[in-house]
Amino acid sequence: MNEEWLQQKAKDHLWMHFTRMGFYKDNDIPIITHGEGCYVYDTHGKKYIDGLAGLFTSQLGHGRTDIAKAVAKQTETLGFFPIWCYAHPSAIKLATRIAEMTPGDLNRVFFTNGGGESVEAAWKLARQYFAEIGQPQRYKVISRNLAYHGTSLGALSITGATGIKNMFEPLVPGAIHIENTDLYRSNTSDLNGEGLSYAKQCALAIERAIEIEGPDTVAAVFLEPIQNVGGCIVPPEGYFREVRKVCDKYGVLLVSDEVICAFGRLGYMFGCERFDYIPDIITCAKGLTSGFVPMGAMICRDFLMEPFLADEKKLFLHGSTFGGHPVACAAALASLDAFEKENLLENVRENEAFFKSELDKLLELPIVGDVRGAGYFYGIELVKNKVTKEHFSAEESEKVLFKFLSPRLFEEGLMCRTDDRGESVIQLSPPLIAGRKEIREMAQILYKVIAEACELVKTA
């Protein structure tokens, strides 16, 4: 299987996800063959620093023999068995491990195959839970503009990024969207003269949506601790505590969508811990197994299980063949072992300030408007005018982000993400094993290439 064969067969048969396939008719597809630590290598042997942890996923980096051994051992013992009316030791151990890590009484773990599926399960559980307790009219959900929650029809309905959902309208009814907490672009002053903090203003938007829709019709609010789309949108101080109060006031479930933010990405095992709130449901995936095997989970507070325990005929009407797969559970358990042995949470916390300070140097460049994020999760927003915060037009964004920055960064050996589903942003989310050497390397490449982009914008 040489390079030429791989290129041709990829073009003939492989339909890559969220990829402009037409671009590769006359261009080579980047083919990654192996990885080690924070680096991956292509078919030519070229080395790249993985500045996105695969896709916010590879917390432990690449080439881990410890995970490989755990997966092989489980495959030899019990390669597959479902958790439909049965259990197996790996699922029991992992559910227990997760319950011991979560805050509050988030003790019930429902395994899925990925993030969007976890979100789908959470909306279905919210709807069935309220039906079981005599409130079947509660089916609506509230989420934020731009927020990404998945691509299946239910999760896509909750998603606020219109560019990836308009094609599939009409979607599932009952999904309401409100403004997000963009501190860089929002007017954070007291908009209504009532002396409200920006955190309270943002929470008030949720409360108003609940009241407009009718409190007895809303089942849940879905929020990411730090919103991915739009470029790592960080909540204002106290925001989630205010949201928790609103949800409690109206009896609405609070779902913390932590598909990206859980398992160390923000320096805590769960993102809700960073922002000091206890949700009713946590949805997670990605870093649960550090990407070695697909897996997700919906983690619920005890009261959500109660209707299903009160009657032996009751069951949550949801499931999948491979949810709780024993090999995935083994990979997750081994990954969590490595978290503890290698003190990865401490590594993220110790390097966070250094990471941010290195990225803040990019603010010297005329097209860098904002650098934001936390832990090992950062967004760099690019603007046409720093003073006015003027956006790039769609044509300019295409030219700067996709036709210049994306290929140049790759050429310089940095894998990261350029995205304009909201603002024009570059995102960084490296493996949690990264140290100051890797952070400095990423920042230096970014500075060099964005500086080149400044010249491109100037001459346009």
Image (tube, helix red, strand yellow):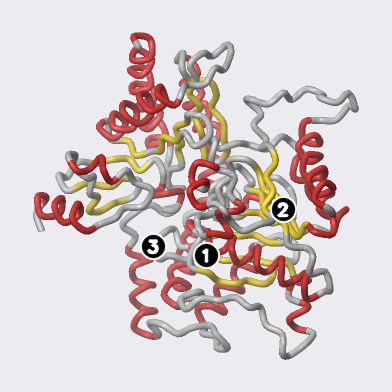
The residue to which callout 2 is attached is 221
User: In front of the other: label 1 or label 2?
Assistant: 2
CB within 8 Å, label 1 to label 3: no
Q: Residue furthest front?
A: 170
- Asked if residue 50 lies left or right of residue 157, the reply is left
Q: Residues within 10 Å of mark 2 (few under 14, many from 20)?
A: many
- Please state which amino acid type lies under the numbered disc 1: Gly
Asked whether residue 340 appears in the rendered view, the answer is no
Give the image location of residue 63, x and y in percent.
31, 57
Give whichever of 297, 457 is nearer the camera.
Answer: 457
CB within 8 Å, label 1 to label 2: no
User: In front of the other: label 3 or label 2?
Assistant: 2
Disc with the residue nearer the chain's start (3 vs 2): 2
Kind of element beneath mark 3: loop
- Please state which amino acid type lies under the numbered disc 2: Val
CB within 8 Å, label 3 to label 2: no
The quarter of the picture where the C terminus appears is: top left
- Asked if residue 413 lies left or right of residue 309, the reply is left
Q: CA distance from mark 1 to mark 2?
A: 20 Å
As drawn, the label of residue 315 is none
Question: Hey, which quadrant is residue 409 in on the image?
Answer: top left
Kind of element beneath mark 2: strand
Give whichever of 110, 217 is nearer the camera.
Answer: 217
Asked whether residue 143 appears in the rendered view, the answer is yes
The residue to which callout 3 is attached is 292
As drawn, the label of residue 296 is 1
Kind of element beneath mark 1: strand
